[in-house]
Image (cartoon, rainbow, N blue to C red):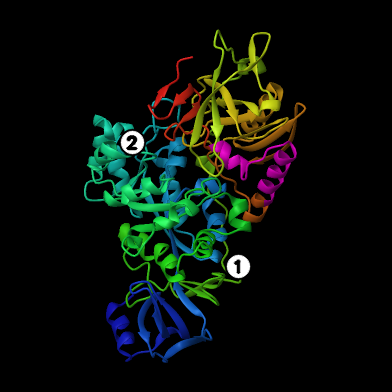
Amino acid sequence: MELSRLIEVARGDAPADLVLANGRIVNTFTGGVEEGNVAIYQGRIAGVGDYTWGKEKVDVGGRFLCPGLIDGHVHIESSYLHVGQYARAVIPRGTLAVVADAHEIANVKGLEGLRYFIDCARRVPMEMFFTAPSCVPATALETSGAKLGPQDVRRALRWRRVVALGEMMNFPGVIGADEEVLAKIGAAQGRVRDGHAPRVRGKELNAYLCPLIGSDHETTGAGEAREKLRRGMRLMIREGSSEKNLEELLPVVDDGNYHRCMLVVDDRNAKDLYRDGDMDAVVRKAIALGLEPVRAIQMATLTPAEYFRLEGLGAIAPGYWANILILGDLREFRVEEVFYRGRRVARDGRALFSVRGPKSGEMTGTMRVKPFRVEDLSLRAGSRATFPVIEVVPGQIVTRWVEDRVSLRDGQVVADASRDLMKLVVIERHRGTGNIGVGLVKGLGLKEGAMGTSVAHDSHNIVVAGADDRDIYAVAKEIEGNEGGLAVASGGKVLGALPLPIAGLMSPEPLEWVAARVEELEGKVWVMGCRVASPFSVLSFLALPVIPELKLTDMGLVDSTRVELVRL
């Protein structure tokens, strides 16, 4: 693009490529709406005003023009979709930029996984930015497929499209001034540094923020949110498939702090993207909960753009990229047309672009499970009268640590559906160690059978919950045989599966097919008694040892507050 020519169009001395006429333009700088036309030249906005001279003119008939939505924190892998199909899912919904934390694929394939994502991003009509994974693995209490040190972080931050240090999940390491953790933060000197600090408050929060960590998306309580805002953090208000924080945190947003609050998705699976939407669904819910529409849009556009220093994004203004949404009503927030760099790429929920299949050969073949037997899934209680149990908290990824009496058979702990106690198993799948962590989970509601997934944050070993060891075994073997994925079994037979052979995390299949399979599998586990929404998304977080209070990895039960293994 010739800057001089853009300026000429802005002056009115040359024709625009496209003029969007008779629009009501959402101004994310002032928080208002103005009437006018938008002149676009070679993908950028030349001006906003009374422009009429253009090679093409589209009369929007008084509809609203809004900048493309920006998801400031997302894990593409959690959608189960490869990058092209993920783009097909979110672009028609109005998401035209993402800041993706790629530590999921990096935990499987290291920096090779991040490079794969960057290569895929070149082929889709949206702005894809990435963060350099800071915690691969997040702790030493699980087995991952890769390990990234400070030099790896420094290398990744030199790559184009990598805009920040990824979420610093090892908050105990920061607070305790761990040498390697601080070296990773030091490698990102002068760059944005994303945070991850669930329930960290008081002096520990002060310690965590000393390295100028800038944001948090793990806040679940209003008091915690206000304290973090007062201490300088930007608040990412999250609403994903299994993480529902919007209703609790939205009352914290006010005239004094809204510009430091942003809406994010974090993790949303293919079915939810296809049925409910992406960032548009979060904006819509925020408005329904009482947030003024333009403010909701600001929190999903300009705020993340300014935080991540995404030049030319987040507003409809001269020199900015012409990433523009057309809507009939701001309160309903139903995206009717989508323009990416001045080109229409979606209309009425349909993508107007095609995507090529993924080049994923180097990302397959990641299942390296040491052979095991049903008997290897046993759990002995020893002399304990009670046993530590992971209790699911509805709508959250934090869990409760409860002590409960166990049911025994031949001296072994067994699931007890009458008391909603299921067996939980994590099977190491990267290095063939043979590690199998076994515990108990409460709150899933299963009455029979088993369900499992290899999308198990953050090291992505195989995690299975069930009422019967035979079914747990059947699910695990099906996932292994499919090179990753989701599976359901009952009566010793597999009832359904979704293969995810790309790093054991993503499918090469179209969005519609993947969404239908997720919906089908969820239906099967609900029939088996499961009572949580997005059950596979919930299951995927039961192995995440940096989220309180109690989790399970391939090495055993983890006290996630102290970040140490539980001695049984």
> Residue 202 occupies which quadrant of the picture?
top left
Which residue is located at x 51 percent, y 42 percent?
396
Residue 149 position, x and y percent, is 31, 34
Q: Which residues are magenta?
A: 516-540
In reply to whether residue 538 is colored magenta, the answer given is yes
Kindly tell me whether residue 265 is visible in this rendering: no
Q: Amino acid at mark 2?
A: Phe
- Mark 1, Cα crowd under 10 Å, few <14 / some 14-19 / many 20+, is many
Residue where numbered disc 2 is placed: 171
Residue 83 position, x and y percent, is 51, 53
Looking at marks 2 and 1 on the same chain, the residue that comes earlier in the sequence is marked by 2
Rendered-image quadrant of the N terminus: bottom left
Kindly tell me whether residue 540 is visible in this rendering: yes
- Quick check: 115 left or right of 537? left
> Residue 324 occupies which quadrant of the picture?
bottom left
In reply to whether residue 526 is colored magenta, the answer given is yes
> Residue 320 occupies which quadrant of the picture?
bottom left
Residue 349 has which mark? Answer: 1
Q: Main secondary structure of the magenta part?
A: helix
